Amino acid sequence: MAMVDTDTVESRTVVTFDYTAFLAESCKKKWSFIDAIYSVIPLFGFVLNSQINKDKKTEDRLRDLALQILSTQISDENNIARLIRLAKQQKITHLRVCLPYALNASQLSSIEKECPSAQLQQQDEFLDVNIH
C-alpha cells in the first residue's frame, strides 16, 4: 500500500495516510540541515515548499510535506495533529490515518485540543478525521 492514497467514499474524497509506512520510510531517510530546520519549525518547510509543489496531486503534496515536517522524535499524537493541520492547509476535508496501534483516550483528547476544527472517529487502528 502507498503511504498516501485517495478513495471516493459516499461521494466524498478520502485521503488515506499510512502512518506506519511513514515511520518505516522516515527511519531510512537521511537528514539534511534543511530537514532538521523543517522538523523544528514546520511552517518554514510548508511555506518554502508550497510554491514548489503546486503541480503535484494533493495526496503527493501531503506525503512530501509529511516526510519533511513529521518526526519520529516527537509523539505520535503531535505528529497526527501536525498531519491534520497539513491536510487542512492542502484543502483535504476527509483524512484516514492508518496507525500501527489504536490510540488511547488521552492521545485522542490531545489531538482534539490541538486541532479543534477536526472531528475524530477511531475504529481499531484507523483514525478517520473530518476537517472543517
Image: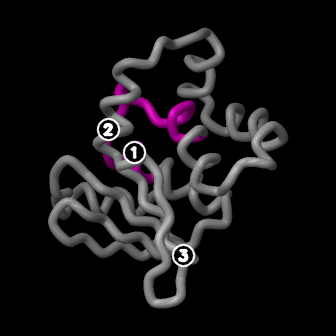
Camera-nearest residue between 31 and 106? 31
The answer to which of marks 3 and 1 sits earlier in the sequence is 3
- Cβ–Cβ below 8 Å for labels 3 and 2? no
Would you call the spot at circle 2 few (<14 residues within 10 Å), some (14-19), or many (20 or more)?
few
Determine the secondary structure under disc 2.
Answer: loop
Q: Position of residue 89 (x, y in %)?
A: 67, 58
Crowding near the residue tagged with mark 1, few <14, some 14–19, many ≥20 C-alpha atoms within 10 Å? some
Write the residue at 33% across / 34% down.
23
Residue 43 x, y percent position in the rendering: 67, 39
Q: Nearer the viewer, residue 19 or 130?
A: 19
CB within 8 Å, label 2 to label 1: yes
- Which quarter of the figure is the C terminus placed in? bottom right
Residue at screen point 47% across, 71% down: 7
Q: CA distance from mark 3 to mark 2?
A: 28 Å
Residue type highlighted by circle 1: Asn
- SS at badge 3: strand
- Which residue bears the numbered disc 3? 13
* Residue 108, x across and y down, in percent: 28, 62
From mark 3 to mark 1, how far is it between C-alphas?
25 Å
Please give the residue where the numbered disc 1 appears in the rendered image.
Answer: 78
Q: Which image quadrant for residue 73? A: top left
Q: Nearer the viewer, residue 86 or 43?
A: 86
Region in magenta: 65-81
Residue at the extreme right: 51
Q: Which mark is residue 75?
A: 2
Mark 3 or mark 2: name the one nearer the start of the chain: 3
Figure colour scheme: one colour
Secondary structure mostly taken by the magenta-highlighted segment of the chain: helix
Q: Residue at x 46, y 51 (%)?
A: 4
